[in-house]
Amino acid sequence: MNKKADSKLLSVWWFVVLLVILVGIVGGTFMFYSSKIDMRLLEGDVLSSRIMGCIIDRGYISQNFIDDKFDIFKTCNISQSIIDKSGNFYLNISVYDLNSKLIIEKSYGNRAFVQECAVGAAMTEAKNFPKCTQKSTNVLNLKGELLKLNILAGSNSEYKLDES
């Protein structure tokens, strides 16, 4: 056979294979980076865990929190502008005694999340509603009295992989 014709036929197939590989890589990268990640439940869980770890020290609740001298943003190193001004987060911290009497309650962020989280949890088609997590634990105050700490944290952030 003619070796010149074989090399021309081979070079055409070579470029076709390279084109298929290039289209596959570009298409896969585009699909990966254009997908959305639902981090709402995880963000709420991380936020509530972080607050709980900041308020509680060795089983005792911070007396500054009870006395309302506690700056949660400064002490827990959380950005106030992200929680309060973005509208994508909600945080509710409440402390009860053993008789379920409310001692102190503080709320930050988008307060509409209380109702929206309940709707979002009840309806499976509610994809644009915020997701909330609730954590409760028993703590002691400085007098040794047992208290119940409840933290409700919610998020409605939606991320794409190419966002920071």
Image (cartoon, rainbow, N blue to C red):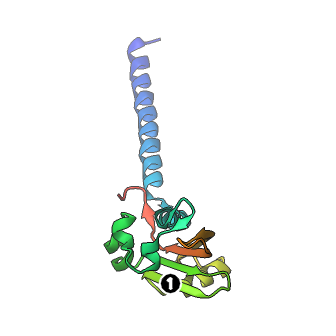
Q: Which residue is mark 1?
A: 105
Left or right for 85, reference 153: left
Left or right for 37, reference 164: right
Residue at the spot x=59%, y=70% of the render?
Answer: 140
Which residue type carries mark 1? Glu
Residue 78 visible from this viewpoint: no
**Relative image position of residue 117 (x, y in whole percent):** 57, 80
- Residue 144 is drawn in which quadrant? bottom right
- Report helix, strand or loop for mark 1: strand
**Relative image position of residue 48 (x, y in whole percent):** 52, 67
- Residue 150 is drawn in which quadrant? bottom right
Residue at the spot x=36%, y=78% of the render?
Answer: 84
78 relative to 33, above or below:
below
Q: Residues within 10 Å of mark 1 (few under 14, many from 20)?
A: some
Residue at the spot x=45%, y=37% of the render?
Answer: 21
Left or right for 147, reference 107: right
